[in-house]
Image (cartoon, helix red, strand yellow):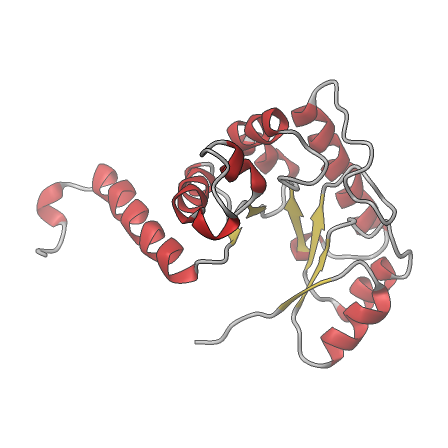
Amino acid sequence: MGAAISVDSRRAGVLEAALQAGAHIANDVSAMRYDPRTSELVANTGCPVVLMHAPGAGDNLHEGGEYASVVFEVFDFLKAVREKAIISGIAEDKIILDPGIGFGKSLADNLALLNALPLFHALGSPLLLGVSRKRMIGALSNEADVLDRLGGSVTLATRGMDAGVQILRVHDVAETVQARNVWRGLRDGALTDLADLPAL
């Protein structure tokens, strides 16, 4: 079973070198706003691209994180960058969207987005959720150190799965896969006659 390699960069030169070296996915946390050459590169290579919401387009991605309605503003942003990507020649089925949890957002903003995740399926692209070990977990758990946030990371990953998120970015792969398997069993058990489930 193979694995897709994703490269995280805002710079077209870095993305190009990584794709030529065998990477498969471009993950641009600036949603292709930082380097204008990125959209042409992605369109020409045909690779999938992750477009993430962040309020800042320059060197500071967290700059300008003030919202009247964070859910609708992030939704509108992702809609706009998705449409721009399609206009630039990127195929719709190559676009993945990320609400950018933790990037220029307060704890309240992050919680609002997580609770509204199902809404983002209306954009028509797969969703990526990156919440593993994020600072918000520490804020909700007596400022737990980044290495002590496994429980919170798995909880938020499960919340993403409940919301139908297709891709999770995680640090603790084995633990999250186990959580996914149990979550899937609970879901399937709710949809299936218990007599049809295999004996354990």
**Quadrant assignment for the C terminus:** bottom left
Residue 68 in picture, x, y percent from top left: 74, 18
Q: Quadrant of residue 198?
A: bottom left
Quadrant showing the N terminus: bottom left
Task: Describe residue 120's horizontal placement relative to residue 42 as left or right.
Answer: left
Please identify the residue farthest to the bottom as the structure is shown: 21
- Up/down of 142 relative to 86, above or below: above
Closer-to-camera residue (30/184): 30
Residue at point 35%, 51% (across, down): 180
State the residue at coordinates (90%, 61%).
37
Q: Position of residue 95 (x, y in %)?
A: 68, 53
Foreground: 9 or 183?
9
Q: Is residue 6 above or below residue 147?
A: below
Decide which of 149, 144 is in the foreground and name it: 144
Residue at the far right in the pictured view: 36
Quadrant in the rendering for residue 18? bottom right
Count of marks overlaid on the render:
0
From the viewer's perspective, tell me whether residue 18 is left or right of residue 181: right
Q: Is residue 176 left or right of residue 121?
A: left
- 22 versus 111 height, above or below: below
* Farthest residue, direction top: 68
The spot of residue 33 in percent (x, y) is: 86, 49
Residue 131, position in %: x, y? 54, 45
Q: Residue at x 32, y 56 (%)?
A: 178
